[in-house]
Image: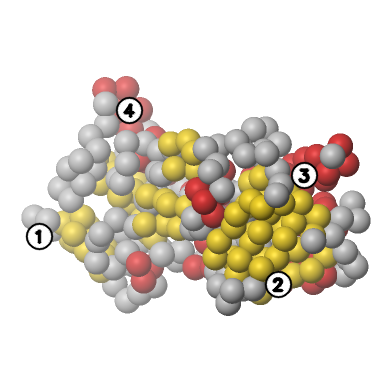
Amino acid sequence: MHDVIVIGGSFAGQSAALQLARARQDVLLIDAGLPRNRFADAAHGFLGQDGRSPGAIIRDATCQLSAYPSAEVLAGKAQEASIDDGHFVVTMRNGAERRARRIILATGVTDMLPDIPGMAERWGATVLHCPYCHGYEVRDRALGIIANHPMSAHQAALIPDWGRATYFTQGLYEPNADELALLVKRGVTIERTPVVALIGEAPGLRAVALADGRVIEIFAVFTAPATKLTSPIAKMLGCAMDDGPTGPFIKVDAWGLTSISGVYAAGDATSPVHNATIASASGVLAGIATHQSLARS
């Protein structure tokens, strides 16, 4: 019987587990080894880690966590979770079971890109989602914003601080009057003919092809992919959900407590704002709150 099982070994899960290990709790971190950021060569804007690969950051974090005698790291996929007599039972893909008094879900989200040829093979390189994470690396170039949800115009208004911006509405996400005025003020070109393909030797990008046959030179594109929860475990446990602009996320309080007693959550699966630093910070809060709930029990 562990004190806490943390499911998910990226920035949020590692941060939560570290707080618990330092509080001398018996913590098990389960990591499937498929973090959302595995497609990016480097993480940026993360204090003290700017420019390092996400994989290197996680390897160091795992090594540091493993130095604590009360922490265990288990490689594998948590397939199911249930509640049994007030405790949590986590079933691995191979059928093995682990039990704990508390559980932290840091299971992340999966990105679903627009259905445009050439997007997937450039994801994380020249097809990007976050200008704060990757905008500086593509600065002073021709940049596109491919609309994928109603807040895409908001994203487009930010991009001119990194490069010459063209907002592709895809014929679906026309800016409203206020958004249009801001885009014009910011010097954003608005293109209403849909992008139908990305051109160039992947993962590089040379241009985008439009439905009317035109080709526009673009160095990189930003888009906000739809997201889904990577793991079904939160729903299995009955956790309440909220709707975000790109997809559902787990409803939590300020300390990461879900609607189910003893179940905490952290990271991208708990917020519509996705950022490495924010994910890590939410893991710290969830780890601290989980320890304090154990101390009071």
Quadrant in which residue 126 is drawn: bottom left
**Marks 3 and 1, how far apart in space?**
56 Å
Mark 1 is on which residue type? Gly
Residue 172 in the image: state x and y as whole percent.
20, 41
Mark 3 residue crowding within 10 angstroms, few (<14) / some (14–19) / many (20+) = many
Residue 248 in the image: state x and y as whole percent.
44, 43
- The circle drawn on residue 287 is none
Quadrant in which residue 196 is drawn: bottom left
Residue assigned mark 1 = 213
Residue assigned mark 3 = 290
* Left or right placement of residue 73 versus residue 168 in this view: right
**Marks 4 and 3, how far apart in space?**
42 Å
Residue 51 in the image: state x and y as whole percent.
64, 63
Mark 4 is on which residue type? Glu
Q: Earlier in the sequence, mark 4 or mark 2?
A: 2
* Left or right placement of residue 212 versus residue 139 in this view: left
Tell me if residue 135 can be seen. Answer: no
Circle 3 SS class: helix
Front disc: 1 or 2: 2
Front disc: 3 or 1: 3
**Marks 3 and 2, how far apart in space?**
20 Å
**Marks 4 and 1, how far apart in space?**
28 Å
